[in-house]
Image (cartoon, rainbow, N blue to C red):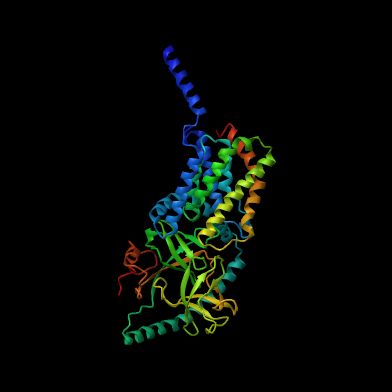
């Protein structure tokens, strides 16, 4: 290296060191203000439904590996649990499942006859009501989302035909609905979230009302029932199908408390969700076959709901049947 | 130093690890004590590398945390930017503290982060969380000396950087 080159290198070094001494970026309060404004803008845009869905779903693809890795330990634990189960345990479970299967098949015989009869009667009435729905099994990604919002992540996304507003069930009852549909994952808002309200009716007498979430898993609230409403502890709530999002007739919750608070104009009614919201590993995503007078389920959502190919265990494309 | 030099790679590794830890499912009794991993790591790097780790790094990390944990977009971005700003202003003083005072300072920062999230929860109409909401900050206080010691050792170990 020549002397001139060495000198020039030394000079650049010195300039760099001097540069490092002085901060040339905008002052830090200004940067903080900028960042805070940006964050607040994002929050407002995100809280007002759906302005940022495109951004969120793009970022969610990048976040998927991290969520996948985080879900592996509990998956492994479950797998090992299965590996180390004793034979006696397995036999016992097998016997239990066989008994349950027998019982369910017994009920199913009756159910098929009733379904046929029901649709015949509806045909007589001239109403276009379809009882059957198409379902897809999705697995919960076992990750701890924001603990102060009641939501879960499932491992099926728009690639499997999931759409925003799609109802989600577990083996027992309604769990919630899809609020964010990413290509590979979807976020499900549970019915117990404080932002969620669900049109229900009391199975015993058909009284319609709305069940809102409380933000606590295991509790729903029925704020709009007058004090003389016919509601009792133990009543089963089922979906009424009024909102157009959930198909009618799925169980939702059971009333556990009916109180008469003199301070409020309405009865204080509490219910416990029938779905095992905090314990399910698998959920069912439902496509409703008949668009049952659906003012809130726009055509665009239905269009997106059409799966590109048939996911496992399904017969034919969900929509445009009637 | 570029992000993809070896030191930068180590920083990225710790951040990704913290993000994974923050959503790792815990048994029920432990989930109340889940420390604020990402905030702790952010504070660590803001203290040790203040020229590289500033407000916008905090903002970007916050966005990542929001997307991964399904929070409102911008919720953690706001609190992390504030934390990064505070550490950036105070890092000379905090670094001079003895370890236990440092831990207390970090605890205050963790409390501020929780307070901001608390405020956002209230503003978006979520129900008020119970007192267990503040427990992770105490876990962070206890964790800080070990975490900073471990990361310091790793940072200067010959086989990593």
Q: Give the mark count.
A: 0
Q: Residue at x 66, y 51 (%)?
A: B138
Q: Residue at x 32, y 80 (%)?
A: A128
Quick one: A83 or B54, which is closer to the camera? B54
Q: Residue at x 46, y 19 (%)?
A: A11
Looking at the image, residue B160 lies above or below residue B19? above
- On screen, residue B119 versus residue A61, left or right, reads right
Quick one: A232 or A83, which is closer to the camera? A232
Location of residue A237 in the rendering, given as x and y in whole percent from the top left corner: 50, 78
Q: Quadrant of residue A161?
A: bottom left
Looking at the image, residue A271 lies above or below residue B118? below
Location of residue B19 in the rendering, given as x and y in whole percent from the top left corner: 53, 48
Quadrant the N terminus of chain A occupies: top left
- On screen, residue A28 versus residue A183, left or right, reads right
Looking at the image, residue B81 lies above or below residue A314? above
Location of residue A111 in the rendering, given as x and y in whole percent from the top left corner: 44, 82
Please say whether residue A75 is visible from this viewpoint.
no
Q: Residue at x 53, y 52 (%)?
A: A70
Please say whether residue A186 is visible from this viewpoint.
yes
- On screen, residue B150 versus residue A227, left or right, reads right
Q: Residue furthest top?
A: A3
């Amino acid at each position: 290296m020549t002397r001139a080159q060495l000198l020039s290198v030394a000079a650049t070094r010195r300039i760099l060191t001097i540069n490092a001494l002085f901060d040339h970026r905008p002052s830090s309060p200004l940067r903080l203000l900028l960042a805070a404004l940006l964050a607040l803008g994002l929050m407002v845009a995100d809280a007002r439904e759906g302005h940022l869905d495109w951004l969120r779903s793009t970022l969610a693809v990048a976040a998927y590996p991290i969520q996948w890795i985080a879900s592996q330990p509990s998956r492994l634990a479950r797998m090992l649990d299965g590996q180390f189960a004793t034979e006696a345990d397995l036999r016992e479970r097998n016997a239990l499942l066989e008994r349950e299967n027998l019982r369910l098949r017994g009920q199913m015989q009756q159910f098929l006859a009733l379904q046929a009869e029901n649709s015949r009667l509806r045909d007589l009435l001239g109403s276009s009501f379809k009882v059957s729905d198409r379902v897809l099994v999705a697995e919960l990604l076992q990750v701890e989302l924001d603990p102060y919002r009641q939501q879960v992540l499932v491992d099926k996304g728009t690639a499997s035909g999931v759409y925003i507003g799609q109802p989600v069930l577990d083996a027992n009852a309604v769990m919630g609905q899809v609020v964010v549909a990413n290509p590979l994952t979807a976020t499900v808002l549970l019915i117990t979230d404080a932002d969620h309200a669900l049109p229900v009716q009391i199975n015993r007498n058909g009284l319609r009302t709305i069940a809102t979430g409380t933000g606590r898993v295991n509790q729903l609230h029925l704020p709009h029932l007058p004090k003389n409403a016919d509601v009792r502890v133990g009543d089963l709530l089922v979906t009424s199908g009024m909102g157009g999002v959930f198909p009618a007739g799925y169980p939702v919750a059971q009333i556990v408390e009916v109180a008469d608070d003199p301070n409020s104009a309405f009865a204080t009614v509490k219910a416990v969700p029938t779905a095992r919201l905090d314990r399910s590993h698998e959920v069912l995503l439902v496509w409703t076959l008949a668009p049952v007078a659906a003012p809130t389920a726009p055509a665009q959502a239905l269009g997106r709901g059409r799966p590109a190919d048939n996911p496992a265990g399904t017969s034919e494309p969900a929509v445009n049947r009637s | 130093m570029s992000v993809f030099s070896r030191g930068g790679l180590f920083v990225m590794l710790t951040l990704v690890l913290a993000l994974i830890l923050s959503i790792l499912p815990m048994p029920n009794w432990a989930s109340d004590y889940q420390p604020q991993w990402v905030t702790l790591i952010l504070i660590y790097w803001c203290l040790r590398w203040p020229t590289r780790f500033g407000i916008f790094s905090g903002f970007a990390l916050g966005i990542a945390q929001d997307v991964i944990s399904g929070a409102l977009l911008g919720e953690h971005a706001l609190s992390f930017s504030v934390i990064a700003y505070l550490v950036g202003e105070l890092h000379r003083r905090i670094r001079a503290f003895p370890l236990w005072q440092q831990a207390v300072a970090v605890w205050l920062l963790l409390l501020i982060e929780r307070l901001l999230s608390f405020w956002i929860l209230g503003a978006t109409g979520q129900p008020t969380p119970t007192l267990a909401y503040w427990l992770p900050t105490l876990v962070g206080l206890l964790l800080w000396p070990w975490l900073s010691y471990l990361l310091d050792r790793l940072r200067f170990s010959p086989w990593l950087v």
